[in-house]
Image (cartoon, rainbow, N blue to C red):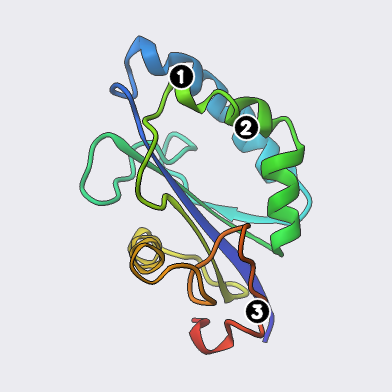
Amino acid sequence: MKFHLAQVNIAKMLAPIDSPVMADFVANLDPINALAESSKGFVWRLKDDNNNATSIKIYDDDYLIVNMSVWEDIDSLHEYVYKSVHTEIFKRRKEWFEKMSDMHMALWYIAEGRWPSVADAAERLNHIRVHGENPYAFSFKKRFSADEAALFIK
């Protein structure tokens, strides 16, 4: 069986998505999403009818936005997040989002051809918040291999 890497990250907006505060973030969504989709190792991303995920809710909070994607491997995701134009937008996150005290991102392995749901993402975030990083849910700081996570792969 082959595996892919799923990722979720959430952010709490400073203002509603259609507010002037969020305008520059929204203006950059399409280019950044297109960059992800054209990046080496990209497989899939969560999106709604507007080609982004800003209307998709997690934790029943209108100010939380969710980003979820699937990648061939952790190195491809890391390259996109930290070594592409994405970093320029990432550096500006304080303009649009609150600093979150709870863990706001998680990585986990899934079987190739499967797509994670928002419920799956919330489960992984909840797990990492309670149990810390382990093969079930982890981050770039404490990586695990698909072999180490094999018992948890769906």
Residue highlighted by disc 1: 95
Tell me if residue 13 comes above or below residue 153 in the rendering.
above
Rounded to the nearest angstrom, the CA distance separating label 1 from label 2 is: 17 Å
**Hey, which quadrant is residue 149 in on the image?**
bottom right
The label shown at residue 32 is 2
The label shown at residue 9 is none
Q: Are marks 3 and 1 in contact (CB under 8 Å)?
A: no
Q: Which structural element holds mark 3?
A: loop
Q: Tell which tag, 2 or 3, sits nearer the viewer.
A: 3
Residue highlighted by disc 3: 146
Residue at image position (52%, 18%) is 27
Of residue 6 and residue 97, the one placed in the foreground of this image is 97
Tell me if residue 120 comes above or below residue 75 in the rendering.
below
Q: Which is more N-terminal, label 2 or label 1?
A: 2
Q: Tell which tag, 1 or 2, sits nearer the viewer.
A: 1
In this view, which residue lies farthest toward the left? 60
Q: Are marks 1 and 2 in contact (CB under 8 Å)?
A: no
Of residue 31 and residue 83, the one placed in the foreground of this image is 83
